[in-house]
Image: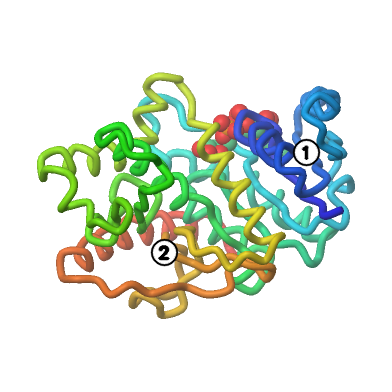
């Protein structure tokens, strides 16, 4: 059986375990600093397995040693965003938590592929890669699947069409400057622009950009069902070597004209993690949106570099 360790047994971590257990993909380990919480949540889910007929072992621990031999490590540990707080406000506190989570788990799972979820996402993924010194295929950030799923959900609400027919591609940094690519998005192959009136489409794009904040305002904390579902999809694509093309945060090495930064782009996920970056051709407007988003991500990367030496 494959093994997936999830660092952070809070709302996102535990919900990721829930989605993953349902898929019967791997045995699962939850690690958290709070005593009792990872143990209690893992045991509760373990006791649900006979009801849903899944043979999955779930273990909770406060000790990284429990993660030994993981195929995938998913990092969700950190502080969630509170109302009025930008993702970047989280930078300092989460840098310390994610740095430790990545380096500690690597000791026990030298071959693991890392999926990072903690915000500010692009920068936490960058930090995890720099701290572990892993090659770029083994550190991937979760953001684009979530942002694209939000857009797909809003398109489905607007049109009444099945989400299965709706393909949306939201790229760029996981912040307010993210880039919903309406030209590449479609409903059963029909470009969104032909299916949805311009004003409605613009409203969908705006709601997608602010999708995280909309949930924070309602819940008073970060979203977790959809982010966790996105992590589960990534883990499945990796373990099953699916070569699934989905938007994720990946380390840029010249693609899209970007270097030495994480950025949301379509990537192919397979058993080696990020198998390759897929490059779309962008028109002038899209390129301008990319540059603007990249500048915002670079700013947070620079803020990180002033806090941490790699
Ligand atoms: N080691 C392990 N776990 C830690 C550490 C640490 N050093 N520090 C904090 N944690 C744990 C907390 O105890 C908590 O259980 O991380 C968990 C975070 O869970 P929540 O507070 O419920 O936050 P959540 O909503 O899951 O969000 C976590 O994911 O989507 C992002 O923006 C979100 O950065 C946030 C992260």
Q: CA distance from mark 1 to mark 2?
A: 29 Å
Farthest residue to the bottom: give it. 254
Q: Quadrant of the C terminus?
A: bottom right
Answer with the quarter of the image where residue 9 lies.
top right
**Is 16 left or right of 287, judged from the image as shown?**
right
Ligand 1 appears in which quadrant? top right
Q: Position of residue 213 (x, y in %)?
A: 36, 32
Q: Nearer the viewer, residue 119 or 193?
A: 193
Residue found at x 51% / y 37%: 226
Residue found at x 75% / y 62%: 112
Q: Nearer the viewer, mark 1 or mark 2?
A: 2
Disc 2 residue crowd, few under 14, some 14–19, many 20+, Cα 10 Å:
many
Under 8 Å from ligand 1: the CB of mark 2?
no
Residue found at x 40% / y 42%: 163
Checking the image for residue 155, the label placed there is none
Q: Is residue 36 visible?
A: no
Residue found at x 31% / y 32%: 157
Marks 1 and 2: CB-CB under 8 Å? no
Under 8 Å from ligand 1: the CB of mark 1?
yes
Q: Which residue is tagged 1? A: 31
Q: Nearer the viewer, residue 33 or 234?
A: 234
Give the answer, above or below, for where 187 lies relative to 254.
above
Q: Which residue is tagged 2? A: 265
Label 1, secondary structure: give it: strand
Q: Nearer the viewer, residue 242 or 228?
A: 242
Mark 1 / mark 2, whichever is N-terminal: 1
Q: Is residue 258 visible?
A: yes
């Amino acid at each position: 059986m494959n093994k997936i360790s999830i660092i952070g047994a809070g709302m996102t971590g535990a919900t990721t375990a829930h989605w993953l257990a349902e898929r019967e993909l791997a045995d699962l380990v939850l690690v958290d600093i709070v005593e009792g919480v990872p143990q209690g949540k893992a045991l509760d889910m373990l006791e649900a397995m006979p009801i849903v007929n899944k043979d999955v072992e779930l273990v909770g621990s406060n000790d990284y040693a429990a993660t030994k031999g993981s195929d995938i490590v998913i990092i969700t540990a950190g502080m969630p965003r509170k109302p009025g707080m930008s993702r970047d406000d989280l930078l300092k506190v989460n840098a310390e938590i994610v740095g430790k989570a990545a380096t500690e788990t690597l000791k026990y799972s030298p071959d693991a592929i890392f999926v990072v979820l903690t915000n500010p996402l692009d920068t936490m993924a960058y930090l995890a890669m720099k701290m572990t010194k892993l090659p770029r295929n083994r550190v991937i950030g979760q953001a684009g699947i979530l942002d694209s799923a939000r857009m797909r959900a809003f398109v489905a609400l607007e049109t009444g069409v099945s989400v299965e027919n709706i393909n949306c591609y939201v790229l760029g940094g996981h912040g307010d400057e993210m880039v919903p690519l309406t030209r590449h998005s479609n409903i059963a192959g029909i470009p969104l622009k032909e299916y949805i009136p311009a004003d409605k489409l613009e409203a969908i794009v705006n709601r997608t950009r602010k999708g995280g904040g909309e949930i924070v305002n309602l819940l008073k904390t970060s979203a977790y069902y959809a982010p966790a579902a996105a992590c589960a999809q990534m883990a499945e694509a990796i373990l099953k070597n699916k070569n699934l093309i989905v938007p994720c945060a990946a380390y840029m090495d010249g693609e899209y004209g970007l270097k030495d930064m994480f950025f949301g782009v379509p990537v192919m996920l397979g058993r080696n993690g990020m198998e390759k970056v897929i490059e779309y051709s962008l028109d002038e407007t899209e390129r301008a949106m990319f540059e603007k988003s990249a500048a915002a991500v670079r700013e947070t990367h620079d803020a990180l570099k002033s806090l941490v030496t790699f």
